[in-house]
């Protein structure tokens, strides 16, 4: 029998540069200031094994790029390790777990982006996670031009970007549409937050979404 998960599991999703890392840090700070136990993690990564897999996936550290099916299995391997060793134990002790990307990235990037079957990806993901689904998913939605501008600003040049960031515009257009389709299919779990706006406005919406979903935060209705 699986242990009872008394914590809260929030994921942030969206295209590259949409502000996930920025807003996860701010949300964590706000929850910690209210004395909550908060665990921040990311995918791929979040464990020593996951961080090694991250290098394989983003920067071809094995000396070759994974084919799409291998790519899915590497993301799932990183996720399985993260769920069992970090996320479930934290949720069991009642912590807030904030993850920068989770399964919806697989459905958007490998499903809508690479064209793999969503049903097959859902099966692989359910095996990796043991069926764990976030309580709340915040989709930071950003148009492709804005996303590209933010990435170029960060690296100085697009050439330094990782393997996913270098994908062509039609790939990025498909995955943005994919994220929006996933959100439309599960409106009770997702909250879509337009992120091409002032940082403070986006942060306010992130906090409001958390207050709307959970009753045990200051300011919740
Ligand atoms: N992937 C991942 C898959 O293909 N399948 C999967 O299953 C999973 C889990 C991971 C890559 O792997 C792929 C997707 C990804 O391509 P990553 O580095 O974790 O890569 O993810 P990225 O999205 O690339 O991370 P980024 O750091 O690029 O994007 P963030 O975290 O969304 O954005 P952030 O917060 O770093 O902000 C980017 C810049 O924009 C500024 C920030 O200051 C920063 O400089 N910014 C704003 N500027 C103006 N106005 C605002 N409102 C702003 N918000 C942020």
Image (cartoon, helix red, strand yellow):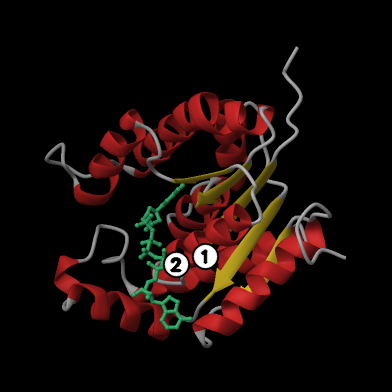
- Tell me the SS state at disc 2: helix
- Would you place residue 177 above or below residue 56 in this image? below
The answer to whether 153 appears left or right of 148 in the picture is left
The yes-or-no answer for disc 2 within 8 Å of ligand 1 is yes
Can you give x and y, in whole percent of width and height, for residue 2 in the image?
72, 17
Residue drawn 66% across the image and 65% down it: 181
* The C terminus: image quadrant: bottom right
Mark 2 residue crowding within 10 angstroms, few (<14) / some (14–19) / many (20+): few
Can you give x and y, in whole percent of width and height, for residue 185 in the image?
75, 59
Mark 1 residue crowding within 10 angstroms, few (<14) / some (14–19) / many (20+): some
Residue drawn 48% across the image and 35% down it: 79
Question: Can the viewer see residue 131 in this picture?
Answer: no
Can you give x and y, in whole percent of width and height, for residue 30 in the image?
59, 62
99 or 142, nearer to the observer:
99
Count of all numbered marks drawn on residues in the image: 2
Question: Can the viewer see residue 34 in this picture?
Answer: yes
What residue did someone put label 2 on? 22
Q: Which mark is residue 99?
A: none
- Tell me the SS state at disc 1: helix
Where does ligand 1 appear, by image quarter?
bottom left
- Would you place residue 81 above or below residue 189 in this image? above
Q: Quadrant of residue 120?
A: top right
59 or 150, nearer to the observer:
150
Residue drawn 36% across the image and 76% down it: 169
Do the CB atoms of the residues marked 1 and 2 lie less than 8 Å apart? yes
């Amino acid at each position: 029998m699986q242990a009872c998960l008394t914590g809260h599991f929030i994921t942030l999703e969206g295209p590259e540069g949409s502000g996930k890392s920025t807003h996860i840090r701010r949300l964590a700070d706000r929850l910690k200031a209210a004395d909550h136990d908060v665990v921040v993690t990311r995918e791929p990564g979040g464990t020593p094994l996951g961080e090694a897999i991250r290098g394989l996936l983003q920067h071809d550290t094995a000396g070759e790029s994974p084919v799409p099916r291998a790519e899915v299995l590497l993301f799932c391997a990183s996720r399985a390790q993260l769920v069992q060793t970090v996320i479930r134990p934290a949720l069991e002790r009642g912590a807030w777990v904030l993850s920068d990307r989770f399964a919806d990235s697989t459905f958007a990037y490998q499903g809508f982006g690479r064209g793999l079957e969503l049903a097959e990806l859902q099966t692989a993901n359910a095996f990796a996670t043991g069926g764990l689904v976030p309580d709340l998913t915040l989709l930071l939605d950003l148009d492709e031009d804005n996303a590209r501008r933010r990435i170029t600003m960060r690296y100085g040049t697009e050439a330094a970007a990782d393997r996913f960031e270098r994908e062509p515009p039609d790939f990025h257009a498909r995955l943005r549409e994919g994220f929006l389709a996933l959100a439309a299919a599960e409106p009770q779990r997702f909250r879509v937050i337009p992120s091409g706006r002032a940082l403070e406005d986006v942060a306010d919406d992130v906090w409001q979404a958390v207050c709307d979903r959970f009753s045990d935060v200051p300011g919740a209705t």
